[in-house]
Amino acid sequence: MSVDMAVKTLEESVGKVVLIKLKGGKVIRGTLQGFDQHMNLSLESAEEVTTDGKPNSLGTLIVRGDNIIIISPPPS
């Protein structure tokens, strides 16, 4: 995937719920509020998705881009 395509996909995902997998195995779900050229993400109503199924509420969150392994956009 080209950088332009990745940026376009993120732009289309602003205001929608995205799923993010981080280094270390944590998975976070939240509403994407914005991002920058380093793929730092701003999430609102973020929650950690745990293996036992109980979400851990995190609120508003900034995720540093170099900690992100996967960003899953909402279904189109």
Image (cartoon, rainbow, N blue to C red):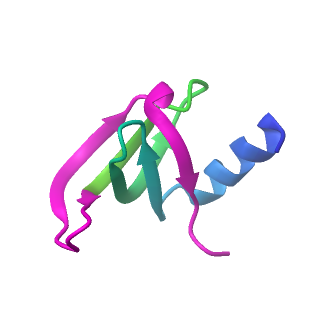
Residue name at image x 78 percent, y 35 percent: 3
Give the image location of residue 24, x and y in percent: 35, 38
Quadrant holding the C terminus: bottom right
The residue at the point 62 percent across, 75 percent down is 75
Marks counted in the figure total: 0
Q: Is residue 2 above or below residue 64?
A: below
Taking the spot 34% from the left edge, 54% from the top edge, the residue there is 28
Task: Residue at 25%, 58% (x, y): give it.
Answer: 47
The image position of residue 42, as x and y in percent, is: 39, 41
Task: Say above or below: 45 vs 61.
Answer: below
| Along the viewing direction, whichever of 51 and 32 lies nearer the viewer | 51
Q: Quadrant of the N terminus?
A: top right
Q: Is residue 14 magenta?
A: no
Q: Is residue 13 left or right of residue 52?
A: right
Q: Left or right of 3: which side holds 72?
A: left
Whether residue 69 is in magenta: the answer is yes
The reply, left or right, for residue 34 in relation to residue 62 is right
The magenta stretch is 47-76
User: Residue 56: x and y, percent?
Assistant: 15, 60
